[in-house]
Image (cartoon, rainbow, N blue to C red):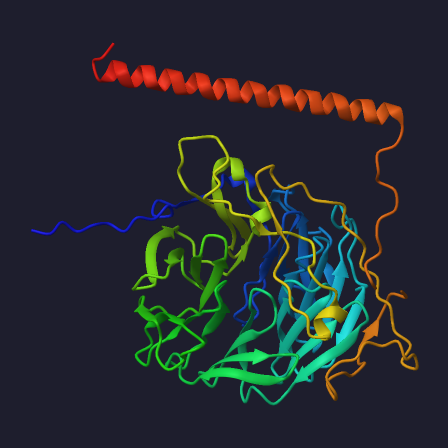
Amino acid sequence: MFRKVVRQSKFRHVFGQPVKNDQCYEDIRVSRVTWDSTFCAVNPKFLAVIVEASGGGAFLVLPLSKTGRIDKAYPTVCGHTGPVLDIDWCPHNDEVIASGSEDCTVMVWQIPEHGLTSPLTEPVVVLEGHTKRVGIITWHPTARNVLLSAGCDNVVLIWNVGTAEELYRLDSLHPDLIYNISWNRNGSLFCSACKDKSVRIIDPRRGTLVAEREKAHEGARPMRAIFLADGKVFTTGFSRMSERQLALWDPENFGEPMALQELDSSNGALLPFYDPDTNVVYVCGKGDSSIRYFEITDESPYIHFLNTFTSKEPQRGMGSMPKRGLEVSKCEIARFYKLHERKCEPIVMTVPRKSDLFQDDLYPDTAGPEAALEAEEWVSGRDANPILISLREAYVPSKQRDLKVNRRNVLSDSRPASAPGSTRPGASTSAASTNIAAPSGGGLSGAGEARKLEEVMQELRALRALVKEQGERIGRLEEQLGRMENGDA
């Protein structure tokens, strides 16, 4: 007789829990536009949700602390003349967000440090280059001010937001509607899922197709493709019989999937959210009331089902908090912001642990807010992985720098070289002068402040010593309790 051995995984017992009602964001009129985007973007400072708006497009930007009922008169970001379809926070500046709209434009906004006090109608920069609605917006993971947009004109544009320039125009690689785009870890390639059922891996700087898999999923409904940290590609889609599927692909051998799993027969598009630190993929179906999560490993069957979080209400959209915005002291490994019809509900994913100490295995160094490259370096051919930060001391955000746009003089010879025929200065801007300006002041000065700093450091050292002492005491008491339970004392 062989006993079935359960696969060991530290994420096997991850459980999801919605927060209490008073920590939700109530009375938000979530957009009803028919587009398969997440409708929600979140970072350690702000929550952004695309909302219903008469006479144009708008999205709400709320400080994370502004929970409870949101007043109908709360100011929105409302510069678009058509419905907003997609939004994305800049990974290198928590106060900068980009939006794409049915009005064929991409706009980049600077949110005030403490949130909006009046409607924001003037973007920092307007990027005009698409001829149809813009449904996909995604920032480059490591290069500052590089933004990708894709529209229903089947064109992918890559912009330098800092100069309002179009860097690359990829208009011949997708014969049909683009469903989604995902950068790889260092931003040298991106993968796309298209209505022609193909998954493509593209080098944007050369404008070339690196690999292509036709009929990745045979169903006609929308699919998604995302890059994993090791360069593999994870896809969601539908079978010929309209069953929802997950698949894992090796771009070196696109012929057959490494793994293919069928989930169910629901008809909502599956939106994957990937955590590169833990190699866990969370899959949320639009219109579902559940979040399934899977661990991706190097052992067959490669995609390992972990668990399902289920609730009563269906989800209209979903946002995912970056790792640096999580509460490490509570062993929180993911936090989702689930959109209902009239509210946004945070859902916390936790690994149960008895110890209150920092869990190194759950929190390896993660991508921080510093850009590894400038836009010009990336254009010149350089690549770099994200600059990592440790979450051990609980991430403390640095002061954000304002985004300012610097229109280059087209007669100047100091313009950086890029691929021939790939640049086109086609954008308008409402600010006069971008590189991101460094903040002035902010350093500690004077003996008084130095003394205060020393006092804080002393208090911190005393607290650390106390925590260590209490930890040792708890260890002794647990040992004593164990002996008593075993009848040794």
* Of residues 327 and 421, the one drawn nearer to the viewer in this rendering: 421
On the rendered structure, is 207 left or right of 114? left
On the rendered structure, is 448 left or right of 375? right
Q: Is residue 11 above or below residue 266?
A: above
The answer to whether residue 274 is seen in the rendering is yes
* Of residues 68 and 202, the one drawn nearer to the viewer in this rendering: 202
The answer to whether residue 79 is seen in the rendering is no
Residue plotted at (71% across, 51% down):
73
Could you say where residue 88 lies in the image, as x and y percent from the top left?
A: 64, 62
On the rendered structure, is 51 left or right of 108? left
Q: In which quarter of the image is residue 488?
A: top left
Could you say where residue 380 lies in the image, as x and y percent from the top left?
A: 73, 75
* Of residues 265 and 329, the one drawn nearer to the viewer in this rendering: 329
Q: Is residue 27 above or below residue 208?
A: above
Residue plotted at (43% across, 30% down):
355
Could you say where residue 90 lies in the image, as x and y percent from the top left?
A: 68, 60
Which quadrant of the figure contains the C terminus?
Answer: top left
Could you say where residue 396 lies in the image, as x and y percent from the top left?
A: 67, 40
Q: Which residue ends up furthest to the left in the rendered image?
A: 1
Residue plotted at (60% across, 65% down):
186
The number of numbered discs placed on residues in the rendered structure image is 0
